[in-house]
Image (tube, rainbow, N blue to C red):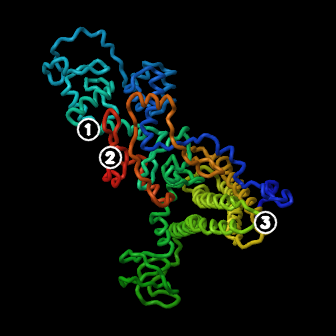
């Protein structure tokens, strides 16, 4: 079994000579305990914590700039909830530039003359009592009826997140409390819609927060602390790419994965096969496949034609020639087109076959896991010297992670070393050299993964103590080897392959020995929670039931869009009844 590993890694492995008891040997995950204790870079925002998460960002801006809540929200929506960018503009350009760019104005009402009992509205040109007039922060004053009509039109047109003043050439954003107060008197449903838009803006306009793309939707959103490419696991169990919202696909870039999915599901390769193996009938133009040795072919429409050149002929022929027909002339373009189509088809078949083989193996994960856990249970019932079998489950998890990486590595190689994306980025010799480098590492990883799979499928529950100890040693060593090879493959891709390209659009999520990071539950800070309670906004919602079933289906993830469709549910706070963000229909029926 020593030939499983590469020579430069031998010092990393355990053997019975180093430790006689073997009971204290840690598994391959032991060295990563410290890493797992680090703060998660991603957080799950549930229906219950959405208002608290939004409120936390609002309070930071309110305290920094000493402004009201609706002004802080206007600034954050304008800067897409990017507080760092907002602070940068504030430091570089000042408060006045920050406010004017976002449409925030603070009007000094003390400069106005004392108001008379009746005032004239400049929109409807009617005299209205002063109590029926409303002045915005920009200083413009109109009657309540005109304001209400203006707000109603804007909300119906989907502009409720940034409703501008209706004065000519005024870009000031209207006070959300005034909008809510006036609209709720005549159209409570629109007031709810307005509040829903404000809450949803935290996700819809925030590049750091995105809905979980699960189907049916679990109701959660994911917030990334840093604006970087990452793969994350939601609390519902779904693993996905935070950048493109498809299933986790590293070491493929998002563009590579999108092209590969499209290529696998559309008819492009079927067309290639037809081009290589059939000829078009010169009469009905339907593809015809030759099923005999004679070059005179007859279509189902009755037309005879020559298989070599595709030209129409009569039916009289011998084994050497066709009567009245000669096609010995070489047509360069046509032959080249057929040769290229055949070469492209063979190349795609090579990579797709291996991609699908590892993908199919991963789909048997539940069955294999149950089988191995059953063997672990049988072993624990025996009076063996070895009592701890965590090395089995750790090796199994390592196997599944590496299988996933291997399957996507073939999709990566198809585009990395083809001419579709990087034709002008590398010379033929450079492409061949990099291809050999990558395939050597891929081959080593694949060999060790297969050996690890073979060892885990051994009937170790029937083995003796010594043989179980021997299997344990090799499983741990292979787990370490596979982890090391995966890490080296990612380093090769990031530094030697993608790193040398001029275009920087192909980036991949970094490798993690622990697998895809599971997002931590969001918890508001103490000051945020206290301010939230004092404002009377509870933010409590009814949490939708989580979707059951497997979460790693490709079609399930990628069929969902980045922005979730709105559903007409409702949840309440002390100010107003808010429409829920995305409750399933069956849950709404129950409520």
Q: Between label 2 and label 1, give the one nearer the viewer.
A: 2
Spatial separation of the CA atoms under disc 3 and disc 1: 70 Å
Viewer-proximal residue among 275 and 127: 127
Q: Between label 3 and label 1, give the one nearer the viewer.
A: 3
Dot 3 surroundings within 10 Å: few (below 14), some, or many (20 or more)? few
Q: Does the image show residue 350? A: no
Against 39, residue 346 (above or below) is below
Viewer-proximal residue among 514 and 312: 514
Residue 363, given in percent of the width and then of the height, sits at: 55, 65
Whichever of labels 3 and 1 marks the residue nearer the N terminus, that label is 1
Mark 2 sits on what residue? 569
Dot 1 surroundings within 10 Å: few (below 14), some, or many (20 or more)? some
Secondary structure at numbered mark 2: loop
Mark 3 sits on what residue? 470
Residue 418, given in percent of the width and then of the height, sits at: 59, 58
Outermost residue on the right side: it is 17
């Amino acid at each position: 079994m020593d030939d499983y590993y590469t020579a430069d890694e031998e010092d990393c492995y355990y053997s019975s000579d180093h430790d006689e008891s073997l009971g204290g040997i840690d598994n391959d995950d032991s060295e990563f305990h410290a890493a797992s204790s680090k703060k998660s870079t991603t957080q799950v925002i549930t229906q219950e914590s959405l208002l608290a998460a939004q409120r936390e960002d609002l309070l930071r801006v309110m305290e920094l700039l000493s402004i009201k809540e609706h002004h802080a929200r206007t600034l954050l929506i304008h800067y897409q909830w990017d507080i760092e960018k907002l602070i940068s503009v504030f430091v570089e350009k000042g408060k006045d530039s920050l406010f004017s760019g976002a449409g925030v104005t603070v009007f000094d009402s003390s400069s106005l003359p004392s108001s008379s009992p009746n005032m004239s509205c400049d929109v409807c040109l009617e005299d209205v009592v002063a109590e029926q007039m409303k002045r915005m922060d920009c200083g413009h004053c109109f009657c309540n009826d005109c304001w209400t009509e203006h707000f109603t039109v804007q909300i119906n047109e989907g502009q409720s997140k940034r409703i501008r003043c209706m004065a000519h050439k005024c870009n000031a954003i209207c006070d959300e409390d005034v909008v809510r107060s006036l609209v709720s008197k005549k159209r409570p449903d629109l007031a709810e819609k307005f509040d829903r838009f404000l809450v949803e803006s935290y996700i819809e306009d925030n590049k750091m927060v995105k809905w979980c793309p699960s189907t049916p939707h679990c109701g959660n959103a994911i917030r990334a602390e840093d604006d970087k490419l990452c793969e994350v696991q939601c609390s519902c169990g779904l693993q996905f790419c935070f950048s493109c919202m498809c299933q986790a696909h590293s070491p493929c870039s998002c563009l590579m994965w999108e092209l590969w999915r499209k290529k696998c599901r559309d008819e492009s390769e079927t067309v290639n096969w037809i081009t290589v193996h059939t000829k078009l009938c010169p009469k009905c133009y339907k593809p015809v496949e030759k099923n005999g040795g004679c070059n005179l072919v007859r279509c189902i429409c009755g037309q005879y034609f020559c298989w070599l050149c595709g030209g129409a002929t009569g039916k009289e022929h011998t084994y050497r020639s066709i009567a009245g027909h000669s096609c010995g002339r070489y047509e360069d373009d046509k032959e080249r087109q057929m040769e290229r189509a055949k070469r492209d088809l063979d190349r795609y078949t090579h990579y797709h076959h291996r991609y699908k083989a590892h993908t199919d193996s991963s789909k048997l994960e539940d069955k294999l896991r149950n089988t191995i856990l059953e063997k672990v249970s049988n072993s624990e019932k025996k009076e063996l010297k070895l009592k701890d079998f965590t090395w089995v489950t750790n090796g199994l998890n390592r196997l599944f992670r590496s299988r996933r990486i291997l399957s996507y590595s073939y999709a990566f190689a198809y585009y990395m070393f083809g001419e579709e994306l990087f034709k002008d980025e590398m010379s033929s010799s450079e492409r061949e050299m990099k291809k050999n480098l990558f395939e050597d590492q891929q081959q080593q990883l694949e060999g060790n993964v297969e050996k690890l799979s073979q060892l885990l499928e051994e009937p170790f529950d029937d083995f003796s103590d010594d043989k179980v100890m021997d299997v344990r040693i090799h499983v741990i060593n292979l787990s370490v080897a596979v982890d090391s090879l995966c890490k080296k493959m990612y380093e090769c891709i990031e530094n030697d392959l993608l790193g040398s390209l001029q275009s920087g659009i192909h980036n991949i999520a970094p490798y993690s020995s622990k697998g895809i990071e599971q997002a931590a539950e969001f918890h508001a800070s103490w000051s945020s929670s206290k301010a939230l309670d004092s404002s009377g906004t509870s933010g409590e919602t009814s949490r939708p039931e989580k979707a059951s079933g497997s979460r790693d289906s490709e079609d399930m993830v990628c069929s969902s869009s980045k922005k979730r469709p709105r559903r007409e549910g409702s949840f309440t706070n002390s100010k107003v009844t808010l429409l829920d963000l995305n409750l399933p229909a069956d849950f709404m029926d129950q409520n």
